[in-house]
Amino acid sequence: MYTSQSHEYDVVIMGAGFAGICQARHLMLNIPNIKVALIDPRPEERTDKDLKVGESLVEVSSLFVTKELGLYEYMIENHTPKFGLNFHWPKDPARTETIDDYLSIWDNRQPSITTFHMNRSKFERDVLQMNKEMGAVFYNGRVLDVDLTPGDAIKTVKSKVNGEVIEIKAKHVIDAAGRRFIIGNKTNNLIFNQVGGGEGSDNLYGVNNGSAWLRVRNMDRSLFHDGYDPTSATASHWYATNHWFGHGHWLWMIPTSTDPLELSIGVIHHHEVIPSEQINTREKFLAFLKANHTHLYKLITSGEQIDFHYLPRVAHSSKMVFSPDNWYVLGDAAYIFDAFYSYGATMISFAAESITEIIRAKLAGEANAEQKRFAFNEFNLTMARSANGVMRYHAKQLGNASVMSWRIYFEYMWWFGIILPLFIGKRHLDITFVPQFTQAFSANIDGVLADVHKQFNQLDRGTNLGILDCYRADQLIGEYYTSKRFDDYLENAKYEPGRTNIFASIKSAYYYVAIWYTMFQWKGFGLAGLLAPRSLYNIFRLLALSSYTAIGELIYRFQTRNLPANSQVEKMRQEFKNYQYQAQLQPWTPEIDSPCTDQQSSEQAVPRLPELSVLS
């Protein structure tokens, strides 16, 4: 049956998973009276088995969900907290019986920004309902086809809903339907690895990975850790994302529920080391754990296994994410690489805010709407390249505790020094800042980051760089640590667009990366490596970028010299100038109308206690 009933909206979102529902809510919170529709073949009541890779938030995605979507209290009340990332390497691959058999880096303190793990099916079910209450329309159906008309012409999404074929029309269409690749397949927009993957692949930096995972309930948590750590940690070890390493693979351990106690445990494996056919069933996955991570095998088998999933190909990307023809790809429909730093939700956060701003500008008829679309498209593609770039050569390096600890430290420097303050200050939506940042960051991805990752491969297998703990403050120079802030954006709550001094953060990040790089060359390759022309070039380039950004910092400070760090705080200060303390209370008891003496009133108000006899 076919119906021509009118279904017209400003935006239709194909897919009501994490990406789709977050995008819908962000649109409705930021564009008054916008008409949004979502379509998804899954029912509103998602089952417990409706889970996929990605149950963990980091600072950027947590800020997006809690602050930009207004879900702070919801997350606290419904999902488990996250205390950073812990990292574990076997001291001897043949012995992995207990946690003591691993070299471990523990997050040793409460995070400055609250982050969360999540039960995806619950989150998607709850937020979809919130969106409907805000006015979004949900179609429980399947997309059959989408007419991607050019320019601003109305798009048509042909769908089957409740047995009927309907046409949903919209000015803008967003593909958040994951690996169905509705727009990607229709536009030849997808990028996959070349056959075979590995170093020879031109696409996706050679990342060629798969993933197996399961969930388990009511396991014996003490098998992991007894929770007693009085001398080193002010954070929970259990409610962190625990990473376990070995040759060609890493595993995650994420708590997704407290009642019942539930874990997600999964592996990202690189096909050149572990082929699919060796790990693609529950039995093979458990056998792999028993042989290589006995500690995790014991934990899993102590509880009730709920489900198992296998994804043979994880990594892919897109040629374009925001089209001039008013279509957009978001989340897994756009790109995904590896769950290593829980980066998927971060990419969704940047992209969702970009999409909202493009659509807002286009609906308002702003003259620079297309300029924003182009700039934001380039920025998000650059961020995707950087996310994939940090997975480069993982197949060779994951099992090496020394190499990976240095690598994690190095990549944390960029995250906390540049990416996080950029998001907090909304610089990714600054049309003057974005093109300059995109150009410089692209050069770093193919420059110093690529050089460092290659050099890790060149180290002699006997080289021991020592271990770098990404949470400690006594390993580089001074009291630097990777999450150190060089602007008081958290202390002064500079969450307003443009108020974070991103230039101060970038300046310091480049400087400390140069120090790290110098130490790496000396420890890894000696004086000859340090004085090699490419090494000297990278060191002086990083210092030059630091100096250049310092000029930007001075300009920023001059331009904002008369602006308050926080407008809400300044408003309170102005209001306080007229404040006067008044030592009085407002009446709160009703007047008693019945005529009585003060003594009678007192007696009625306070019942008399019976007299007591004292026996002597």
Image (cartoon, rainbow, N blue to C red):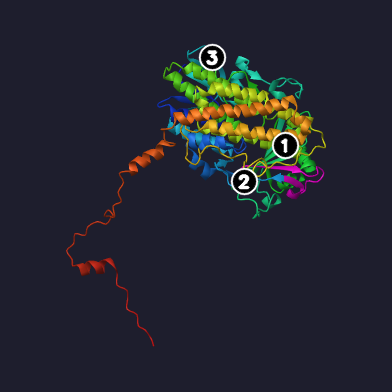
Per the rendering, the mark at residue 147 is 3
Estimate the x, y position of residue 31 in percent, counting from the top left.
43, 26
Marked residue nearer the N-terminal end (2 or 3): 3
Quarter the C terminus occupies? bottom left
Give the class, few, some or many, for how many residues have Cα within 10 Å of label 2's Cα (few <14, many ≥20): many
Q: Amino acid at mark 1?
A: Met
Q: Is residue 140 visible?
A: no
Estimate the x, y position of residue 469 in percent, counting from the top left.
68, 42
Q: Amino acid at mark 2?
A: Tyr
Along the viewing direction, whichever of 459 and 326 lies nearer the viewer: 459
Residue under label 1: 404
Residue located 35% across and 83% down the image: 613
Estimate the x, y position of residue 412 in percent, counting from the top left.
64, 36
Report the mark closest to the observer, 3 or 1.
Answer: 1
Q: Which residues are magenta?
A: 84-103
Along the viewing direction, whichever of 205 and 225 lies nearer the viewer: 205
Element at badge 3? Answer: strand
Residue under label 2: 239
Depicted 301 relative to depicted 518: above or below: below
Along the viewing direction, whichever of 357 and 32 lies nearer the viewer: 357
Element at badge 1? Answer: helix
Residue located 45% across and 20% down the image: 361
Q: Is residue 365 visible?
A: yes
Estimate the x, y position of residue 285 in percent, counting from the top left.
75, 38
